[in-house]
Amino acid sequence: MLTTALLLVGLGLPPTVMAQDQFEAPSWTLGWSTDMDNGYTVSLDEDWDIEGELVAYVENTRMSQIQLDLTYDVNSWVPWSIDAPESITVAAGENKSITLTLSKAVDDDGVREYNPDNTSTLSIMADEKVGETSAGNQEIDGTVKLPKVFNLRPEITPSNDELHAGSSVAISMQMVNLGNANDAVKEATAQVRSCPHLSVDGLDALENTVVEPTGARNGKDSFATLTLVASESQPRRTCEVTISIVSEGDNAARSVTFDVEVFAYEEEDQPANSDDSSDDDEDSSNGLSVESNTLPGMFAVEAIAMIAAGGLLRRKKTEM
């Protein structure tokens, strides 16, 4: 009786429902093992080498193996390449991983040309093959990013003018951004060794200066003019000057050191007043010559006076 009822129910079902229950095979799934909710950021070292690894998976819940052809695509230009399998075979009931290795594909300048503010979409397409026929496909995608690298440092062009005590000279400083993103000067300082009377002016104006990447993405060069000021009391000496700037991007201080020679007159180096000494010599020689010339005149007058007196005495004796 029960068998007859079940047979009648089975006969009453539509043929499509019976076919689905009998012939529909369990599915397979393509997905990410790597957390891609916020995207994936590759590693970038100081030599601009790129390293990254993404892992996807295929879960096969069928009772038979499947053969998948894999293709990879990125929606924009990127400075890395992808090394991953072109096809995989997934056994029945297996969950198989697909590893994608990302590596540097261009030179250092090419890596810096890529703007880290951009994001690229990486897609994986899996196409099931039955012989030469496609039996279905699935696709997943995720965002891949490049990290920001900050490397802000100063470079100095010395002045061609000599620096003397009591004067100043201007020097040119370039703020060089060797990173791959815009940066800014958080702080600028100067340190002077061996010369307490030498100072550097113009550092305050550098703060908050935005510096674009140097030599990449048509970045504009950033220059500033600093002034070296030597007080009048600065002796002649070679001074060591260090200029440091702090990057707003990574909060690191980088510096450049250079020598500045300050010239100053010492007391013994000052020229003597030759005019005064020549005048004194002339006056002295004139005085000596006048004194020597008057002595003969005085003797002549005395001799004449004595002769005259002698003549008067003889005349008086004769008259007597």
Image (cartoon, rainbow, N blue to C red):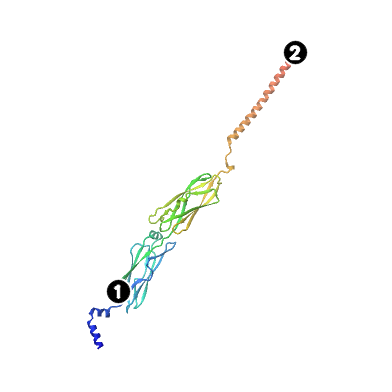
Image-quadrant location for residue 319: top right
Name the residue nearer the viewer: 2 or 236: 2
Residue shown at the point (68%, 23%) measured from the top left: 298
Q: Secondary structure at mark 1?
A: strand
Q: Residue at x 24, y 86 (%)?
A: 5
Looking at the picture, which amino acid does disc 1 mark? Lys
Q: Earlier in the sequence, mark 1 or mark 2?
A: 1
Mark on residue 129?
A: 1
Q: Amino acid at mark 2?
A: Lys
- In this orientation, which residue lies closer to the viewer: 258 or 121? 121
Percent coordinates x, y for residue 110 in the rendering: 39, 60
Furthest-right residue in view? 320
Local packing at callout 1 (Cα closer than 10 Å; few below 14, some 14-19, many 20+) is: some
Above-or-below relation of 275 to 94 = above
Query: How many other residues sit within 10 Å of disc 2, few (<14), some (14-19) or many (≥20)?
Result: few
Name the residue at the top extreme: 319
Q: The residue tagged with tag 2: helix, strand or loop?
A: helix
Q: Quadrant of residue 144?
A: bottom left
Q: Which residue is mark 2?
A: 316
Apparent side of residue 159 relative to residue 59 in the rendered image (left or right):
right
Q: Can you give x and y, in whole percent of width and height, for residue 225 in the image?
A: 45, 49
Nearer to us of marks 1 and 2 is: 1
| Viewport quadrant of the C terminus | top right
